[in-house]
Amino acid sequence: MAEIRVDWRRLQSFTAEVFERAGLPAEHAAIEAEVLVWANLRGVDSHGVQRVAGYVHSVEAGHYNPRPDIRIERETPATMLIEADRAFGPVVTTYAMRQAIGKARTAGIGWVLIRNTTHQGAMAYYAQMAARENMAGIASVCNPPNMAPPGARAPGVHNSPIAIAVPGSGDRFISLDMATSVAAFGKLDVAVDRGESIPDTWALDEDGLPTTDPRRARFLQPAGGYKGYGLALIFECLSSLMVGNPLLTAAITGPGATPGVQNSFIGAIDIAAFTDPATYRTQIDELTAAMKGLPRVEGVEELFVPGEPEERVHRERIEHGIPLPPGTRDKLIEVAVKFGLEVPWNGDLMDDQ
Amino acid sequence: MAEIRVDWRRLQSFTAEVFERAGLPAEHAAIEAEVLVWANLRGVDSHGVQRVAGYVHSVEAGHYNPRPDIRIERETPATMLIEADRAFGPVVTTYAMRQAIGKARTAGIGWVLIRNTTHQGAMAYYAQMAARENMAGIASVCNPPNMAPPGARAPGVHNSPIAIAVPGSGDRFISLDMATSVAAFGKLDVAVDRGESIPDTWALDEDGLPTTDPRRARFLQPAGGYKGYGLALIFECLSSLMVGNPLLTAAITGPGATPGVQNSFIGAIDIAAFTDPATYRTQIDELTAAMKGLPRVEGVEELFVPGEPEERVHRERIEHGIPLPPGTRDKLIEVAVKFGLEVPWNGDLMDDQ
């Protein structure tokens, strides 16, 4: 089976076109496409265009709102509460991070909560928005349960990710983006698309037993046992409970959570409130060099800081295109057919199927 | 060997007396003793009175400053930078958290950085200060390297802990307090004191190889591999680099870090800026009940939320006293002899040695 690589610009305009056809305003469709393709460019395929068809289904099912009424409900000098009205995640989250950055400029820190957003894609995108403005950026999200607390044989928390980014010189960052599970669910989807098995530490099956078959995986295992569980539970307390929309409790003991809806917290800390940003960025470079220069375990060729492997993939894929495995192509073909669009790659598809 | 249990009030006044003799003002000595004994009460013996002798040594060596000039260096509506002048950690950190709480009341969030503090004890103490004021509390700290990044065979980062606490009803909290290593170094000290071995996933020896002998442990292994490493590195970026005092770089490639000195970030988020605090606290109770009610793996008797096991130990030790293993008693005897104080337990010590 030939590998197909697609130029990122072509993939991005295709994706934007899909979302316009799905009912989003052109500007919103462009943001959504940019955030998804940015994830693919960085090798985070789990949060890239493989999700396009699913998002379109969510619009059709009435779960995602293509024309949301995004409202600021509460505001203080440093905080804000935004009702997203089930907006597409990147649409409301880029808006929220711009608000956080603005507040950080005057108050030193901006802290913005979002209620009722939908899937936000790769959270590092938003954290890096702040880092590009000489700030530390923070972004997290909570969804209904998909991860078992230690000792439980049912999902209790979401494997909520957290992304934190700080700027080095030029376009360099230290950019952490981690799920609180051993692996994110999107990676299981990618394994299904690729027909691969998974380590037995990633997921549990419907009986609560470890599985190596991603198709049998029903929920995730937390990273570091109670640490991953604890972070995930606390993120729910800092987002969903803080915005008056407790997702986990509703899903476990209540009427069930609203499909597709999630809550989020977004922060920006202004470096200039504490120290000189230019000095800070130089010190980030020095810290990066110190980490990379540590003595290595035999067989390890290079040490990385968070975000560096993704940045390397980004450079490669900008130049050589984004590889699309068959399962992902199927999903793009589905939406292309639905909206009468051409798929963003050349050649006779039948040869590749 | 008989187990010795000491009444917490007696242990706390003994500890305060030691610190007064070591040169701290009475008020500061009382804060220091309260935070240390609080850790023992919660079963976090690694951060309790076993450290008293070491702190006294640090004063004698000139590393800890018993009479610090704590200064506010920068301030915005929501942020503050504090120079601790090598104050005892609990002295400056309780001050910093009070500042953060004050700012959160008007700005919605308070974010305070501390430069040049010394060991801060159990970070959950500070997070719970905010939780008692209807806020979410956050506290973290960075020290010189003691943990190996994945692939490195030398320490590169500190196993920086993070504590986050939110209030339920009454005196209940969800209170996460986790190191970014598999286990904290203090737990290795406790294992040495108890003459116990440790799991081979906790620490590496001086050759960078896993060890089960806590006396041979030189540095720690991160929780969840790159996740624990990434969090620890990012915490350094949010504290040490933000206050212009990069500890890791100085220790690895520079002149070495100042002994005993660490940097910290402290946050408080006002629940009332987003939602009704009474409703929030009820929802924390409901979330706790939902977690505890999940189906359990066979053989697991009870599920816990973060902080709950410590709270249970707290109730038991308030009633029955704090157990002191022989190694810890030796350290307390050392300072009792040094300052001509009576140890805070009864009976002929020789019978217990």
Image (cartoon, coloured by chain):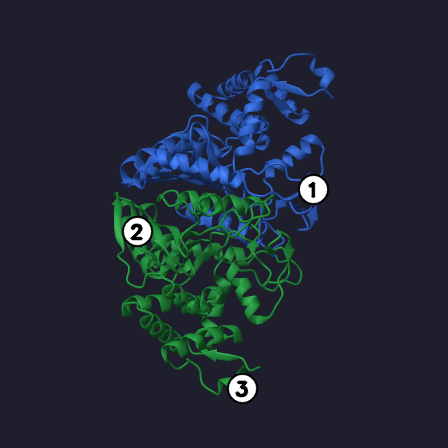
Chain colours: A blue, B green
Q: Is residue A332 above or below residue B339?
A: above
Which residue bears the numbered disc 3?
B351
Which residue bears the numbered disc 1?
A216
Amino acid under disc 1: Arg
Q: Is residue B62 above or below residue B333?
A: above
Q: CA distance from mark 2 to mark 3?
A: 47 Å
Q: Secondary structure at mark 1?
A: loop
Please provide percent x and percent y for residue A298: 66, 43
Co-location on one chain, circles 2 and 3: yes
Amino acid under disc 3: Asp
Q: Mark 3 packing: few (<14 Cα in 10 Å), some, or many (20+)?
A: few
Camera-nearest residue between B106 and B210: B210
Instruction: Specify the subunit that label 2 lies on.
Output: B
Q: Mark 2 packing: few (<14 Cα in 10 Å), some, or many (20+)?
A: many
Quarter of the picture containing the N terminus of chain B is bottom right
Residue A40 visible in the displayed image: no
Is A278 displayed left or right of B163 in the figure?
A: left
Which residue bears the numbered disc 2?
B83
Quarter of the picture containing the C terminus of chain B is bottom right
Q: Mark 1 packing: few (<14 Cα in 10 Å), some, or many (20+)?
A: few
Camera-nearest residue between B182 and A219: B182
Q: Secondary structure at mark 3?
A: helix
